[in-house]
């Protein structure tokens, strides 16, 4: 089967490639792309989110190099929230537990909001994910 075209690559700076790879595989079960290098991590570190979207995790020094004169947001400062819709409230709760087990943190516990049952969590580098039952 031929690889389909990619329409969107979401790139985020990370501190530790191994830790981030393990987190995203354990917490979200994202599909890892590429052959591992000697350290067991593919380069570039990418996950297939769906047929047309990839998540690329770049070590902070490389991320800063790409940004050139712009500044990467320091830890604890978020410029975006990544939204992940799931089918039911039970799926939100299960995913939050997986995120915690994989080394992430809960920012806002799962609760019913006007827009749905939702929780905010962060990966080990502080990138925020909003999990919402739709």
Image (tube, helix red, strand yellow):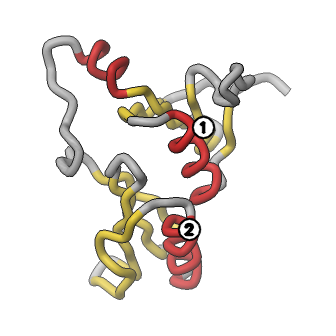
Instruction: Specify the label residue 109 is tagged with.
Output: none
The image position of residue 119, as x and y in percent, is 38, 74
The image position of residue 28, as x and y in percent, is 59, 57
**Looking at the image, which residue sits at the far right?**
1
Please give left or right for residue 23 compared with residue 12 in the image. Answer: right
Point 68% across, 43% down: residue: 31
Q: Comparing marks 1 and 2, which lies closer to the viewer?
A: 2
Point 64% across, 29% down: residue: 41
Q: Nearer the viewer, residue 36 or 8?
A: 36
Q: In the picture shown, does residue 25 fall above or below 56?
A: below
Q: Nearer the viewer, residue 100 or 51?
A: 100
Disc 2 crowd, CA 10 A, few/some/many (<14, 14-19, 20+): few
Image quarter of residue 38? top right
Per the image, the residue denoted by label 2 is: 101
Point 29% across, 13% down: residue: 65
Label 2 element class: helix
**Looking at the image, which residue sits at the far front?**
39
Label 1 element class: strand
Please give left or right for residue 43 compared with residue 10 in the image. Answer: right
Per the image, the residue denoted by label 1 is: 47
Q: In the picture shown, does residue 119 fall above or below 46?
A: below
Image quarter of residue 116? bottom left
Disc 1 crowd, CA 10 A, few/some/many (<14, 14-19, 20+): many
- Badge 1 or badge 2: first in the primary sequence: 1
Please give left or right for residue 19 compared with residue 66 in the image. Answer: right
The image position of residue 66, as x and y in percent, is 31, 14
């Amino acid at each position: 089967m031929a690889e389909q075209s990619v329409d969107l690559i979401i790139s985020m700076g990370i501190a530790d490639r191994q830790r981030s790879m393990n987190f995203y595989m354990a917490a979200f079960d994202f599909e890892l792309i590429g052959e591992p290098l000697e350290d067991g991590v593919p380069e570039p570190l990418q996950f297939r989110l769906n047929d047309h979207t990839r998540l690329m995790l770049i070590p902070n020094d490389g991320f800063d190099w790409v940004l050139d004169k712009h500044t990467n947001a320091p830890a604890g400062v978020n410029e975006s929230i990544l939204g992940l819709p799931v089918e039911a409230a039970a799926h939100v709760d299960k995913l939050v537990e997986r995120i915690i087990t994989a080394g992430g943190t809960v920012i806002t516990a799962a609760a019913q909001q006007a827009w749905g049952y939702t929780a905010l969590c962060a990966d080990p580098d502080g990138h925020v994910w909003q999990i919402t039952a739709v």
